[in-house]
Image: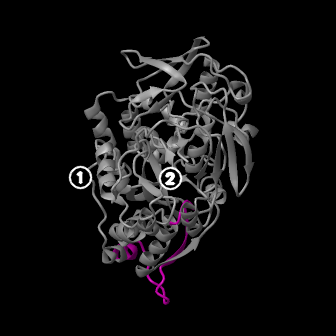
Amino acid sequence: MIRLICGALALLLGVSPALADGTPKRGGTLNMLVEPEPPTLVGIANTAGPTGKVSPKVTEGLLSYGFDLKPQPQLATSWEVSPDGLRYTFKLRPGVKWHDGADFTSADVANSIRLLKQYHPRGRATFSSVVDIETPDPLTAILVLSKPAPFLLTAFAASETPIVPKHIYGEGDPAANPANRAPIGTGPYIFKEWVRGSHVVYERNPTYWDAPKPYIDRLVVKFIPDAAARAVAFETGAVDIGGESPVPLSEIERLKADPKLGIETHGYEYSASVTRIEFNLSNPYLKDIRVRRAIAHAIDRKVILNTVWYGYGLISPTPISPVLARYADPDAKIYVYDPKQAEQLLDEAGFKRGPDGVRFRLTHDFLPYGDGFKRTADYIAQALRRVGIEVTIRSQDFATYIKRVYTDRDFDFTNNSMGNTFDPTIGVQRLYWSKNFKKGVPFSNGSGWNNPEADAALEAAAVETDEEKRVADFRAFQRLVVEEVPDITLLSLSQVTIYNRKVKDHTVGAGGLNDNLAGVWIDP
């Protein structure tokens, strides 16, 4: 279904999946746009979108994935799952070196999985059933589970489960490790410098295990905060490639007319995502379910889709994206746009309009990740003003936003985007599971929702090997979210990559630009 949806969009845009294009040429510099600037360069304890783009260039995964999400070798050359689903045996690639010259071994894998389980926002759920990692020899790692994890074999991409060196990350909180600012990995590119607010430079790894890759001499990751300037950078050649719709959507049609530029819609199969309004349930107004339902009725998703996001997406009434069609609930209740119903609910909640027409005031923080979330915030403020809720929009940089929402919890409500990833247990559970409501952990249960029935449904789906039962568990969970409205799912966005046509083999799997780009090359 993922391939069908992306393929349909590809036909709509007049593009086709990237394929090997001629004989690779060596040399050159690839200028890649990433916006906003990542808070860290290693994803061992962070799931920020920008980090997911830069981390895999240095720190690789055990596996990579084709467009069909079938696993392919990376640091692991083969793998086997026991019939009871409780042992995952990985044979590791021999002769691999860390960038500092140390040998890559199973000890690095075991330590990385331990860190991911303890500190990674999604890893807490991904590896919750892992009770031991056996290392019978330097090139064998065996994950031992207490219960089945039907999603696990699809979780080992570099952007999701980076493998980091034990001799550098052996002790302490990995989020505080200075190597996050100057990473050491096994990947095709070696870190050179990070100039804050400007760029990161990576150079070709001359001893990379997958010789003769990489083909380019240098990868420069550039940060350009201004949306209009990003579009100009593509036109002038200052940047060669960028993903996740890196320019205003209103600019895409114009850029498509430039013969030196191409548009690619593949490379997002691993990272289905939804946009959402998320409430802080400790807010005195928003803790009232009638207020949350009123806000749901005051929002017109069609306007958000067609006006804010220029039609690049699908309306999604539940937290599981329709891209993950087998799990999304097609019969989910949706709060139809009905301002009169919204006003009635607010009256019933006791929040009458004052002399100035205002019932109460809220502050709204939007995710500073492209311009669509600011436009969504503007629409939300207008829509809620019509029903008597005055909204002040607050903007900030990415790091301040993360601290405000997940550490300080100094927010009323926000609009953001969260990746479903390739499976709801990994991408969705973290946002609603009461056990993942932890201050300081980004992209976790930001609302503070606690529903034992939802917890039970999510926990059951995480270990259920019968697919029909697993679908039923996820749909039961979705009904609870829609009923209690800890957030409002809006859209599943359709993303595009913009690239200079001289850049070849940039999108060769489900991760797209979140893969290691070892095979990318430039045709001068």
Left or right: 88 with respect to 36? left
Q: Is residue 131 magenta?
A: no
Q: Position of residue 323 (x, y in %)?
A: 33, 48
Please identify, in this view, whether the residue under mark 1 or under mark 2 is nearer the observer: 2
Does residue 169 sit above or below 341 in this rendering? above
Q: Is residue 365 magenta?
A: yes
Q: Position of residue 293 (x, y in %)?
A: 37, 65
The one nearer the camera, 71 or 344, is 71
Q: Is residue 315 visible?
A: no
Amino acid type for the residue under numbered disc 2: Gly
> Where is mark 1, residue-wise?
331
Q: Position of residue 278 (x, y in %)?
A: 48, 59
Q: Residue at x 31, y 47 (%)?
A: 328
Amino acid type for the residue under numbered disc 1: Asp
Residue furthest to the bottom in view is 355
Q: Which residues are magenta?
A: 344-371
> Where is mark 2, residue-wise?
243
- Which circle marks residue 151 in the picture? none
Q: Residue at x 49, y 33 (%)?
A: 126
Does residue 458 sit above or below 357 in this rendering? above
Residue 196 sits in quarter: bottom right
Residue 384 sits in quarter: bottom left
Task: Tell whether label 2 touches label 1 (CB within 8 Å).
Answer: no
Which of pointers 1 and 2 lies earlier in the amino acid sequence?
2
Residue 484 sits in quarter: bottom left
Does residue 201 sit above or below 211 in this rendering? below
Crowd band around label 2 with a 10 angstrom C-alpha radius: few (<14), some (14–19), many (20+) = many
